[in-house]
Image: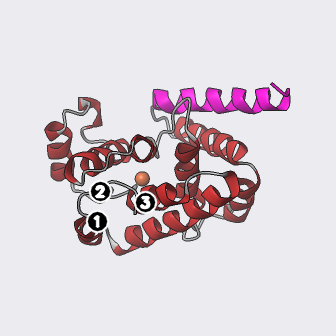
């Protein structure tokens, strides 16, 4: 294991204690899918496995616990009461500060797994997409998105972002700036690749 992590056993216990059964299963599914996508698209499989397995470690915190971590690590006040956004940022902070994870790429892929961002690394894209297309997901288009993810990671990213933005818009919710920037970034990246730049 070349990834810095001061106590892997405690980290493993941490997700077993803090995640609901279904969320734990999802985490293992994201790990498997992230390794698969890493193999297909040339990302580091070991980092993909690690980030995939632990990306949701803060997902099932109750509001009080989440808020106390947000304060402890001086994260944005905007995250308070917003589990969907907070669990990614808090998860990365816990990996870094409580489990000695130093790998920037791993920490960022966890931090941005919900929103995505512009200038995503390959690992960011692998984790962002694996989170949505892992085998335990149950939505009707899963086969389509898995197949797309195997063939074209950027395209999968774009279509997931488009779906997310459309869905949030339809529900009258705010879209995170990082998500909007990610969408334009990956859209332009695909366009430039097509133009042979
Ligand atoms: Fe998540
Ligand atoms: Fe997840």
Q: Residue at x 21, y 48 (%)?
A: 66
Q: State the CA–CA distance, disc 2 to disc 3.
A: 10 Å
- Asked if residue 28 is positioned above or below residue 175 in the image, the reply reads below
Mark 1 and ligand 2: say if the CB distance to the nearest ligand atom is below 8 Å.
no
Query: Which residue in the protein does label 1 denote?
Result: 8
- The C terminus - image quarter: top right
Please identify the residue farthest to the front as the structure is shown: 2
Position of residue 106 measured from the top left corner of the image (x, y, whole percent): 42, 48
First in sequence: mark 2 vs mark 3: 2
The CA distance from mark 2 to mark 1 is 6 Å
Q: Quadrant of residue 23?
A: bottom left
Give yes or no for residue 195 being in the magenta stretch. yes
Marks 2 and 1 close (CB-CB < 8 Å): yes
At x 46% / y 70%, what residue is drawn?
A: 28
Residue 109, image x and y in percent?
46, 45
Answer whether labels 1 and 3 touch (C-beta < 8 Å). no
Q: Secondary structure at mark 3?
A: helix
On the picture, is 40 further left or further right than 104?
Answer: right
Locate the N terminus by quadrant. bottom left
Whether tag 2 and tag 3 are in contact, CB under 8 A, the answer is yes
Q: Quadrant of residue 75?
A: top left
Per the image, the residue denoted by label 3 is: 50
In this rendering, the answer to whether 144 lies above or below 77 is: below
Q: Nearer the viewer, residue 184 or 51?
A: 51
| Residue 5: assigned label | 2
What segment carries the magenta color? 175-197
Task: Give how far across and how far down residue 159 sits, in percent.
Answer: 68, 44
């Amino acid at each position: 294991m070349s990834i810095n992590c001061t106590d892997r056993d405690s980290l493993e216990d941490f997700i077993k204690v803090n995640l609901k059964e279904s969320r734990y299963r999802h985490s293992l599914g994201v790990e498997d899918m992230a390794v698969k996508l890493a193999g297909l698209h040339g990302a580091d499989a070991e980092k993909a496995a690690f980030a995939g397995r632990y990306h949701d470690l803060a997902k099932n915190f109750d509001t009080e616990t989440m808020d106390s971590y947000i304060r402890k690590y001086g994260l944005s006040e905007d995250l308070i009461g917003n589990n969907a956004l907070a669990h990614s940022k808090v998860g990365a902070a816990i990996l870094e500060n409580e489990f000695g994870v130093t790998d920037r790429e791993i920490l960022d892929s966890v931090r941005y797994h919900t929103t995505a961002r512009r200038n995503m690394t390959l690992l960011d894209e692998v984790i962002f997409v694996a989170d949505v297309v892992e085998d335990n997901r149950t939505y009707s288009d899963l086969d389509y998105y898995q197949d797309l993810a195997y063939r074209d990671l950027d395209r999968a990213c774009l279509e997931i972002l488009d779906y997310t933005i459309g869905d949030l818009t339809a529900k009258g919710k705010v879209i995170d700036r990082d998500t909007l920037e990610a969408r334009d970034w990956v859209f332009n990246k695909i366009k430039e690749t097509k133009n042979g730049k």
